[in-house]
Amino acid sequence: MTLSAVEVKKLKQAPPLEGVLPVVLSRWSPRSFADRDVSPADLRRVFEAARWAASSSNEQPWKFLFGTRNTPTYTKIFECLVGFNQSWAGSAPVLILGVTNTKFTHNGVANGYALYDLGAAASYLTLQAAALGLSSHQMAGYDHDAARKALEIPEDYALGSVIALGYQGEPAALNHEQLIEREVAPRSRKPLDEFVFTAWGEAADLG
Ligand SMILES: Cc1cc2nc3c(=O)[nH]c(=O)nc-3n(C[C@H](O)[C@H](O)[C@H](O)COP(=O)(O)O)c2cc1C
């Protein structure tokens, strides 16, 4: 007997701190997705959120390719995933690949913040998804060269993560004991004093 989806959702919730956005606390990355499609209206909403991320020089260098189940783009993205990710990500009704233009469009000069900006847009996307009751799970584990080829991504574009999107499923639906264990494990994070400094190596006193 493992935990139910509802119980896991509760367990994954970050401890509350008054004033922190609820979606920041509730977003987490499941590997079990329910057999339920994402509506076109909600897809529009998650990409709209990504659209409003800040970017260097307002370049908005990101592009997102997505496929819904049983479409050629979905299959192409899925087939590029490493075996471990293929073992669970096929339950997600939507697979998204984020890519980013490494050159500024107005002058062709290298944009050193292209991946940074894509990451920001992806964060907006995943938080908006959480706000809509959707779940997302990003993956770096895929064959980047194969994805570039299969999806005809131009050389100037760097590849970010693949994002599985859908509704959280039952942990028991995962077909490996190890996957179920990870699905029901508590989330962990470094404490603030390990990464918020007032001088290098000096933890800020934030109470
Ligand atoms: C860029 C990136 C790449 C990731 N790659 C993978 C992956 O290939 N496979 C996987 O199962 N999880 C992957 N993850 C998920 C992380 O392991 C997960 O976000 C992290 O453990 C924190 O858990 P949380 O998202 O539930 O808070 C990735 C996450 C990010 C942001």
Image: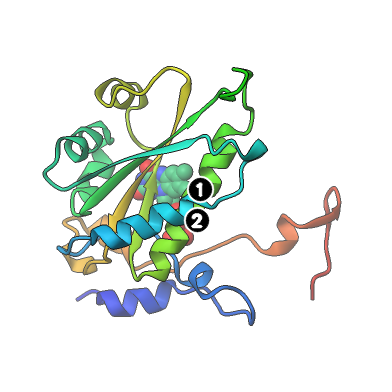
- Numbered tag placed on residue 121 in the rendering: 1
- Quarter of the image where one finds residue 65: top left
Q: Which mark is residue 124?
A: 2
Q: Nearer the viewer, residue 133 or 39?
A: 39
Q: Amino acid at mark 1?
A: Ala
Residue 84 in view = yes
Horizontal side, residue 109 vs residue 174: left or right: right
Answer whether labels 1 and 2 touch (C-beta < 8 Å).
yes
Q: Residues within 10 Å of mark 1 (few under 14, many from 20)?
A: many
At horizontal 46% and vertical 71% (from top left) the residue drawn is 26
Q: Amino acid at mark 2?
A: Tyr
Q: Relative to residue 97, is residue 38 drawn left or right?
A: left
Report x, y in % for residue 166.
Answer: 27, 59
Up-down: is 176 above or below 143? below
Could you tell me which secondary element the residue under label 2 belongs to? Answer: helix
Residue 133 in the image: state x and y as whole percent: 34, 71
| Rendered image quadrant of residue 83 | top left
Residue furthest out toward the bottom: 18
